[in-house]
Amino acid sequence: MCGRYALVDTRGLQGRFRLNDNSAPPAARYNVAPSQEMPVVLAAEGERKLEVMKWGLIPFWSKEPKASYSTINARAEGIADKPAYRRPIRNQRCIVPANGFYEWQKSGTGKIPHFIHLKSDELFGFAGLYDIYKDPEGHELHTFTIVTTEANELVAPIHNRMPVILPRQAEDEWLDPTVTDPFQVTRLLKPFPADLMEVYPVSKKVNSPGNDLPELVRTLNSA
């Protein structure tokens, strides 16, 4: 699963994701937690844009605007058949920008948090889905989820799941609104190559969503 992530290089968002957006970059975040609002990348009419949404997908058909914990992630396996994701996988796909994510490894002294990122330290994008819930008064709530898959060799010793990191060459296809066949895009939902990634233990300060500091993404010895 993916329950925490970091988006540090916000000034690089426009160039990295080819955004048609000249607005000021959002603040850097070192410990993003479920229910918080974060930018996601959407595509429409041949252009990409950022939109801020709440993490934790609420289906449009929900009876109330409350996301269950399970909707922060969507398992890639069988995703096209699940009621909450059946429509989003066809025409409501997004990219969730990030610099890395956290996972906790069980040990004899408790769970040890680890930060997982690309060796290049560059920005990347999680495969995401979104939906728009409308309350009885017509107010809209835009929410998203991060798609997960089986862990690669790097992540597996820590957790058996990992978020889907889209290769750059797959991002256009994932965002393409004309692609509505779920079987075409679900083939993109694979573990990212382990040899391009790095993992190291970090401070347990990341356990609290209230902590949002640069030291959280540093190796434990330097935190």
Image (cartoon, rainbow, N blue to C red):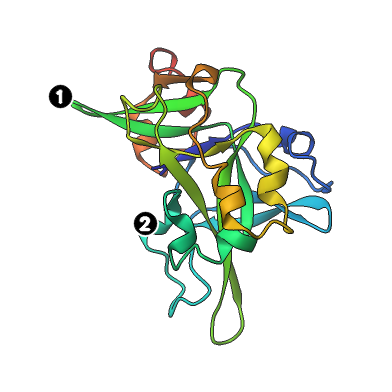
Q: Residue furthest top?
A: 221
Residue 212 drawn above or below residue 40: above
Q: Is residue 30 visible in the rendered structure shown here?
A: no
Q: Nearer the viewer, residue 109 or 199?
A: 199
Q: Nearer the viewer, residue 151 or 139?
A: 151
User: Disc 2 versus disc 1: distance between alpha carbons?
Assistant: 27 Å
Name the secondary structure under disc 1. loop
Q: Residues within 10 Å of mark 2 (few under 14, many from 20)?
A: few
Q: Position of residue 187 (x, y in %)?
A: 55, 43
- Mark linked to residue 163: none
Residue type at tag 1:
Gly
Q: Quadrant of the C terminus?
A: top left
Mark 2, secondary structure of its residue: helix
Residue 120 image point, x, y percent: 62, 18
Residue on which disc 1 sits: 108
- Residue 79 in sight: yes
State the residue position of label 2: 70
- For the point 42% across and 69% down, the residue is 66
Please report the residue visible at 42 percent of the width from the left and 58 percent of the height from the top.
Answer: 71
Q: Is residue 48 left or right of residue 144?
A: right
